[in-house]
Amino acid sequence: MRLLLVHPRFPYRGRDAFPLGLGYLGAVAREKATVEAVDENYTPLDFDRLAADPPDIVGISSTTPSFPRAMEIAAEIKRRAGETLVLMGGTHVTFCPEEALRSGVDIVVRGEGERTLMEILDGLPLKDVKGVSYKSADRVIHNSWRELQEDLDSLPLPAWDAFSLKHYNIMSIITSRGCPYACLYCCAAKFWKRRVRYRSPENVLEELREIASMGYTMVRFMDSTFTLNREHAMRICELMKKEGLDFSWSCETRADSLDNDLLRTLADSGCNLLCLGVDSGSQRVLDETQRKMRVAVVKAAFRKIREHGMSTRAYVTFGFPGESEKSVRETVKLLREIQPDQILLSLATAYPGTELWNMKQSRHVYPHPSWIAKFHGHGYGGRLFLPEGLSRKDYMRLADYLWGEVRKLLRDKSRLKPETG
């Protein structure tokens, strides 16, 4: 049996971000199938070749920004290789499976996909496969949700060799799955059921050894909050240093999950960049988005990180509930004070599976895509949230003001324009 995994191209992406989700799916599928993979951010899918020698199954990943392209791929495969079974998974279709099924997708995989994919490859009747949605006699069937994967160490290491690794200068890795928070704009709470599961530090070290053996010197830890479990993060750093792994690495974390001893350990093991969700300089906006974060804690974190010699990236978002002229100016004031080395500016986007998507009487604004694209982060391809009290004209005026101030801040620091995350 042949399985083709496809990562559709999309407008924004992390620099050199290896598609870990497909990497794990490819690894477990190798027990049952020959696995190939295409990352369209580097190599367009060759439909002529696919039609001439169709695989048995194609699995397509999808986020909201990549979903339009994912639907194009599914429709073209069904048109040119109709016998091929088309699966689609990812955050967007987990919460909007009907949209994918209308595009010709045969099966939507909701939530974590490893065990679900294995049962499909085993030929288990769809009615008995948890975590899938599919059509039967023109009816959409949603099977019950699949339980989360408890033992992450039992998963094989990602199928790196199914991809063209020459495109990835930085290798991604994840040491945990899930997030305990319930931020208004993030689907993690619903996708991961507000739970966090960890790989053992020794299992993480095994993967880091393999990444080093492939010649990589830069690593990105993709956990929602790498330092959420302080002891877990410290142990991984200690093992990296003991093993002599000479990586330059980065991670995402929260300002309230850092202290001086931890920062020292991160820096000593090669961390050169910490990426923090700042979102806003307005305490009202942070409270409205359920961030459970204080502006004062953000200020202190950036100061401490700088003292330990690491660079910082601030994720900033315009347009959350409570946004106003005053809150935007508070954000600019905060950025001037904390002086991030990099700033990724996004527009508040209501994604499926988030509370922002489900808010009653929510309003949305749809500027021209070229205007949205300049913000570099979230916003492209989704519903932009229009805060109460702002007209569409004021929304764009304030967003442009914040964008200009961010550019000025980075220019003053002799940095480039806001980078993708």
Image (spheres, grey):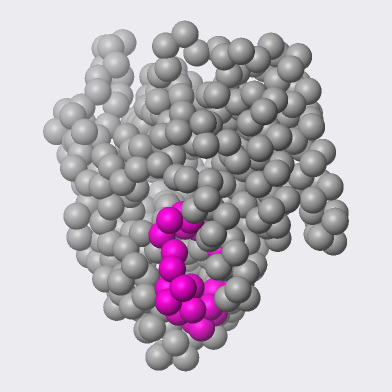
> Is-magenta flag for residue 268?
yes
Identify which residue, 256 or 416, lies in the foreground. 256
Report the residue at 26% width, 47% height from top. Answer: 195
Report the residue at 33% width, 78% height from top. Answer: 235
Residue at far front of view: 296
Q: Name the side, left or right, on which 373 lies relative to 327.
A: right
Residue at far left of view: 128
Q: Name the side, left or right, on which 65 lies relative to 404.
A: left
Q: Is residue 400 visible?
A: yes
Q: Quadrant of residue 378?
A: top right
Q: Is residue 212 visible?
A: no
Magenta span of residues: 252-274
Seen in the picture, residue 44 relative to 266 is either above or below; the reply is above
Report the residue at 46% width, 73% height from top. Answer: 260
Where is residue 217 drawn, in percent x and y? 59, 78
Where is residue 130 drawn, in percent x and y? 19, 35
Where is residue 276 drawn, in percent x and y? 54, 54
Seen in the picture, residue 176 relative to 109 is either above or below; the reply is below
Where is residue 396 drawn, in percent x and y? 75, 22
